[in-house]
Amino acid sequence: MVFSEPLVAGHLIRRYKRFLADIRLEDGSVVTAHCTNSGSMKSCIEEGAPVYLSRAKDPKRKTQFTWEMILINGGWVGVNTMIPNLLAYDAIKKGEIAGLDKYTNIKREVRFGDSRFDLFASNDHESAFIEVKNVTMKVGDDVRFPDAVSTRARKHLETLMEVKRSGMRAVMLYIIQRIDVNFFGPAYDIDPAYAESLKKAHQMGVEIRALQASVSPDGIELVKELPTEI
C-alpha cells in the first residue's frame, strides 16, 4: 500500500482524549491530528518521537490530519487502525495470503448475526468471514492483543465461533504494524476474558493468523506470517 500523497513529518507532543494528538510540524507549527486507535497504545507512545501524518481529503473535517505512524526504537510503528483492513482486503483480492488466495468474491463490512465483520470472501466451493485487528503492543520479543480491555473484540470472537458452527470458514486475522517482534499471542494480563475466548475459538477451529507489515513513510506492505502462541 502506497500513500496517495506525501506524508507530513512532525514530532508527537501528546495524545489525549483517546482520539486526538498534538503534533509539532517541522516548521514549528502545532496541529491536532485524529488518532484512530482507541486502545491504550502501550509500547507505541513516546512524547517527542518522530511521527508522520496524512492530510484529510475532506476540507470540512474538524481535524485536517490523521496520525499514521511513530518511530519507536529506530523502527516505524503503524498506529492507524484503518490500514490493516485495507491491507487485508487488497492482499486477499490479489491472492497474496496463503490459504486465503482462492476467493473470487470479496466484500467489506458484512453482517453475520449481531456482528459486522471486516471481510467476507467466497468462491464456488466455500465462504469465509474474516475479522481484522491492528496489533502494535510489544512485550519482549512478542506482540500482544489487545492493549486494553475490549468487549467488542471478544464479541467478534464469539460470533466467529457461530460462523464456524454454521459450516463456514472463520478467520481471525491480526495485522502487526511493526517488524521488531517475532511471535503473536493474547494479552492475558490485560484482558484475560479475551484471551480465554481466543483459546476457545482456536480449539473450535477458528483460524488464527498473524501477518506482519513493514511500515515506512513510503508505504506499508505485508511481509510475512508470524507464529502464534495461544
Image: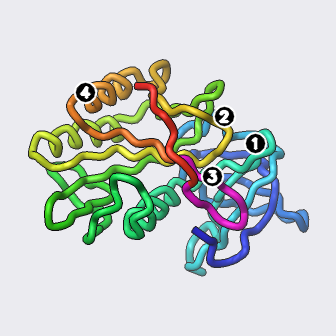
Residue highlighted by disc 4: 203
Q: Nearer the viewer, residue 224 or 77?
A: 224
C-alpha separation, residue under disc 1 versus residue under disc 3: 10 Å
Question: Which amino acid is tagged 3?
Answer: Gly
Q: Nearer the viewer, mark 4 or mark 2?
A: 4
Give me the residue at 23% from left, 50% from top.
115
Say which element carries label 1.
strand
In this rendering, position of residue 30 left or right of residue 170? right
Stretch of the chain drawn in magenta: 212-222
Percent x, y for residue 128? 23, 54
Question: Which amino acid is tagged 2?
Answer: Ser
Residue highlighted by disc 2: 43
Query: Looking at the rendering, in which quadrant would you find the C terminus?
Result: top left
Give me the residue at 45% from left, 21% from top.
188
Say which element carries label 2.
loop
In this rendering, position of residue 140 left or right of residue 159? right
Residue highlighted by disc 1: 72
Q: Between disc 2 and disc 3, whose residue precedes?
A: 2
Q: How is the image coloured?
A: rainbow
C-alpha separation, residue under disc 4 versus residue under disc 3: 30 Å
Q: Between disc 4 and disc 2, whose residue precedes?
A: 2
For the stretch drawn in magenta, the main secondary structure is strand
Above or below 150: residue 224: below
Residue highlighted by disc 3: 78
C-alpha separation, residue under disc 4 versus residue under disc 2: 30 Å
Q: Between disc 1 and disc 2, whose residue precedes?
A: 2
Question: Which amino acid is tagged 1?
Answer: Ile
